[in-house]
Image: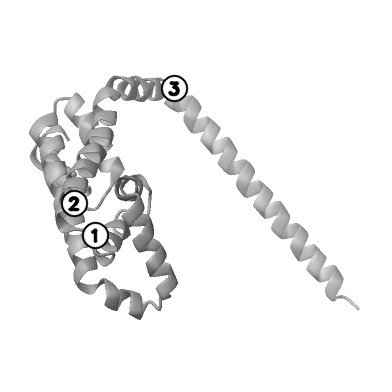
Amino acid sequence: MESFITTYGAWAVTAGAMLQEEMVLILGGFFAHRQYLQLFPDILLFALLANFLANHVNYAIGARYGEKLFQWLKIPEKTKEGIRKKIAHHPLQAVLGVRFAPGLHTLGPILFGLSGFSTSKWLAYNLLASSLWVGVYGSLGYFFGQTIELIIEDMERHEGLIAAIVAVVAAAFFWRKARDRIKNMKLRRVSSEP
């Protein structure tokens, strides 16, 4: 496993950063803590470049095709104007907001491109937001690596108990589902009788 992570880990983190996957960065940071990867450049530099470029491509798509996309989706002009105003009045908050808000990672840069936001400002804000995003999630895995290791060790020590608890909860869940199904079948039978 260690050689696999050492060989392909930086590529996985780079791909994860392009796809805006926080958990990949956290795991990358954890593997850097375990010294399977290097925090720099494997995590911080490669992920920063990948995230920055992916967001800039989305910005360019918004700048080039955003109007057509909004027409195709039948987005009202009032909504587009609202987006433009919010971006114009609070650009830094908007860049950071969409970078850290789940589900808006890809759409946010497209909206910036669509809004006519200055490319030079976008590049600066995108670099800042990508740096913060990579720094926060990459560092979480790295700095909490010791804690994660302790949790894993604890889980290994108590895996029998954990497995028993999971089995009891699953059995109770399925027993209740079966009981409810039987009850519903009896109710249907009674209600269908004349």
Vertical relation: 11 (above or below) 71: above
Q: Amino acid at mark 3?
A: His
Asked whether the viewer can see residue 104, the reply is: no
Rendering coords of residue 67 (x, y %): 28, 75
- Specify the quadrant that holds the N terminus: top left
Vertical relation: 57 (above or below) 156: below
Mark closer to the observer (2, 3): 2
Q: Amino acid at mark 1?
A: Phe
- Spatial distance from mark 3 to mark 1, Cα to Cα? 54 Å
Category of crowding for the residue at label 1, using alpha-carbon neighbours closer than 10 angstroms: few (below 14), some (14–19), many (at least 20): some
**Residue at horizontal 24 percent and vertical 37 percent from the top:** 132
Q: Amino acid at mark 2?
A: Lys
**Residue at horizontal 12 percent and vertical 41 percent from the top:** 10
57 relative position to 193: left or right: left
- Spatial distance from mark 2 to mark 1, Cα to Cα? 7 Å
**Residue at horizontal 17 percent and vertical 44 percent from the top:** 127
Near-viewer residue (180 or 69): 69
192 relative position to 145: left or right: right
Which residue does the numbered mark 2 point to in the structure image? 121
Q: Earlier in the sequence, mark 2 or mark 3?
A: 2
Which residue does the numbered mark 1 point to in the structure image? 117
SS at circle 1: loop
Q: Earlier in the sequence, mark 3 or mark 1?
A: 1
Rendering coords of residue 19 (x, y %): 24, 53
Which residue does the numbered mark 3 point to in the structure image? 158
User: Quick check: marks 2 and 1 in contact, CB under 8 Å?
Assistant: yes
